[in-house]
Amino acid sequence: MSRRVTLFHSPNTRSSAALTLLHELGADFELHVLNMKAGEQRQPAYLAVNPMGKVPAILHEGALVTEQVAVFLYLADLWAEARLAPGIVNDPLRGPYLRWMAIYGSSFEPALVDRAMKRDGGASSMSVYGDFDTLLKTITDQLAQGPWILGSRFTAADVLWGTGLAWTTGFGIVPKLPVIMDYVARVGARPSVAKVREFDAALADKHAASAATTAG
């Protein structure tokens, strides 16, 4: 079986984290770049891949995987030798790893949307994340045990959380608490993060130039 995957990517989006993970894994991949400024994610060609018009998405051996957390789980297990995912069998960190991957998608992102929209998340008994302050404390308490989400071991969960917290603190959605910013700095110091940042900046400039030419 070939392990070469195709990543559908647009600069400075959630797919940037997936691209960072691919570099961390030393994975064999090709990119299909979407210009979201031109609305390519809403065109029939991409909607045939992901009807929701969102990135990241990956194709591997005919299998489509969408949703950021699912993409991360799939890739980290596919390149198991990189040891960015605790083993499925007899690894005591597998459960905590899955827990923190799930918290990101099922609790953290919904909480972010409510926070950014300045809307009440509803009664804690009905909310998928309870309440924002409790969720935030759960995250900071975990980070305080550092240096990584699972303690001494760096995993794909750190690529997910580190890039996510960098973005959300940058936009002021998550407070810039010392324990969070120290963690963001540790993840941000990895070569993969700098590589994707530079790549995305060049792509974004190219897309902006294309939009200006079209408008002219």
Image (cartoon, helix red, strand yellow):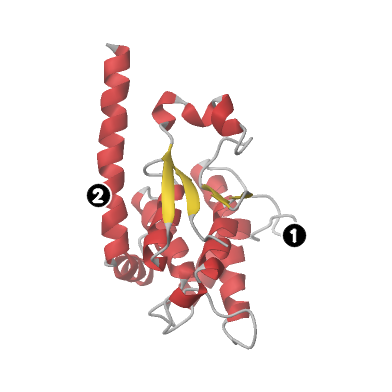
Residue 102 appears in the figure:
yes
Q: Is residue 105 left or right of residue 144?
A: right
Where residue 198 is drawn, which disc sits there? 2
Name the quarter where the C terminus is drawn: top left
Return the residue found at the far top. 216
Question: Secondary structure under badge 1?
Answer: loop
Residue underneath mark 1? 125
Where residue 199 is drawn, which disc sits there? none
Estimate the x, y position of residue 83 in percent, counting from the top left.
Answer: 47, 77
The three-letter amino acid code for the residue at tag 1 is Ser
Return the residue found at the far front. 1
Label 1: few (<14), some (14–19) or many (≥20) C-alpha neighbours in 10 Å? few
- Residue 129: image quadrant is bottom right
Q: Nearer the viewer, residue 181 or 18?
A: 18
Up-down relation of residue 121 to residue 92 (above or below)? above
Question: Secondary structure under badge 2?
Answer: helix
Q: Residue at x 63, y 58 (%)?
A: 106
Residue 134 appears in the figure:
no
- Residue 102: image quadrant is bottom right
